[in-house]
Amino acid sequence: MKKTNHVFLILMLGSLTALGPFTIDMYLSAFPQMAHFFQTSVAQVSMTLSSYFVGLASGQLIYGVLMDRFGRKKPLYAGLIFYIIASIACALSPNIEILIFFRFLQGLGACAASVAAFAMVRDLFTPQESTKVLSLLILILGVSPLLAPTIGGFLAVHFSWSVIFFVLTGIAFTILLVISRFLPETHHGDKSHVLKPMPIIRNYLSIIKEPQFYAFALSGATAFAGLFAYLASSPTIFMEIFKVSEAAYGWIFAIIAMGIVGMSQFNVPLVKRFSSEKILIGAFLSLLTVSLVFCFCAYHGYYNLYSVIFTLFLFLACIGLSNPNSAALAMAPFGKKAGSAAALMGFLQMVLGALASLGVSLLKAQTLLPISILFVVLSTLALIILSLGMRQIKNKVEVSGDEDMGLAH
């Protein structure tokens, strides 16, 4: 593959992975305006975020099977068209309940993009290369939180919150046009995948039973839920607790997001010197340390706006380091089932993310302490799951006598 084509391919895959986060980040700064428009609270508006995550989770398992059966592109087209229709409906929603419903449908369409991108990475690259490519995708993904809140804040201030959803419609339509013309099909479908409930369930169970998958996918998803907890709580933290403006919120959000972007790129040279497993353990230990410090400072009141920004920057940096490694390790054992494995991994991320964001909504926190405690719980669980899972992998190696379990080094 020519270098130019290689770069363009990664850009196209990156646009697919960025669509979902862009849909999340662009409207966050408009939460207060939306609460005023719908005559409700910011906490109630944040339920639209939870419903979006539920939609993302629900669609993962559906698209995974469809992409293994019919190829990657046809289900991807269907998902993007569904997303476009739902986005228009969101913009025209007359009340918060209807918006919550259509955000669910929007998530249902958006998840096709991320499932296709991860499956295509597995189709095209080796596990070692996948880690590097995933880090590059996260770099592109990082453009979303750098730009989306600022763009969304501008649109909300100068137009209205509904215009944000029309802009998202245009973005999705542009992506659809580009990939239909330039993105190659990487898997032409496998007719042996039967679209019946029991075979589908057995297919997913066979993936779950693989120790390498549940060790890295579940621990990675638990840590990644910290990102969703941050996303759901950030409007409250900055616009409610610290009283910053919509424009300032966009800039703060962008600064913090540089943590996840920068560390994901630092991962590229890091995997050349250390195994992905060692990097992942280090990332989780760092995540727990940052969470504990944040919780301690929140409890004693040792914080201000700048210290909170710095702490959250470090928190997202740890997630930026852990995510590409956990994803590459979880996907490594699967070939033809890459679509299903990517979908199941995405399902875990979205379910835990939905629960984390729902937890933030239910807390209705007016201080940093409840949010910081949630960070500690998630980072602790991630480390425990990883430790138990790696012990299972080691036991399986010893029993089978097979020293190569497909782990990425």
Image (cartoon, rainbow, N blue to C red):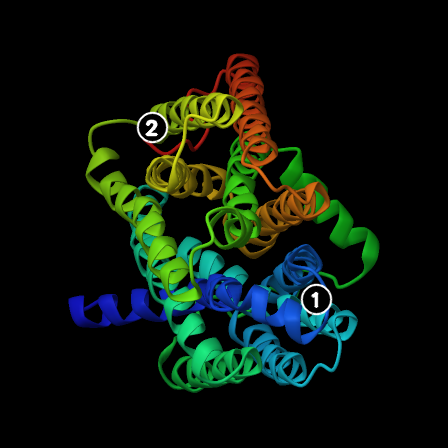
Closer to us: mark 1 or mark 2?
A: 1
Report the side of 346 relative to 41 (left or right).
left
Confirm whether residue 285 shows in the render.
yes
Confirm whether residue 337 shows in the render.
no
Seen in the picture, residue 34 relative to 282 is either above or below; the reply is: below
Q: Which residue is mark 2?
A: 279
Q: Where residue 133 sits: x, y (%)?
A: 31, 52
Mark 2 element type: helix
Label 1 neighbour load within 10 Å: few <14, some 14-19, many 20+:
many
Quadrant of the snapshot with the N terminus = bottom left
Report the side of 156 relative to 6 (left or right).
right
How many labels were placed on the picture?
Answer: 2
Q: Which residue is mark 1?
A: 104
Report the side of 257 relative to 391 (left or right).
left
**Residue at point 38%, 76% (across, down):** 183
Question: Gap between marks 1 and 2, in whole Å?
Answer: 35 Å
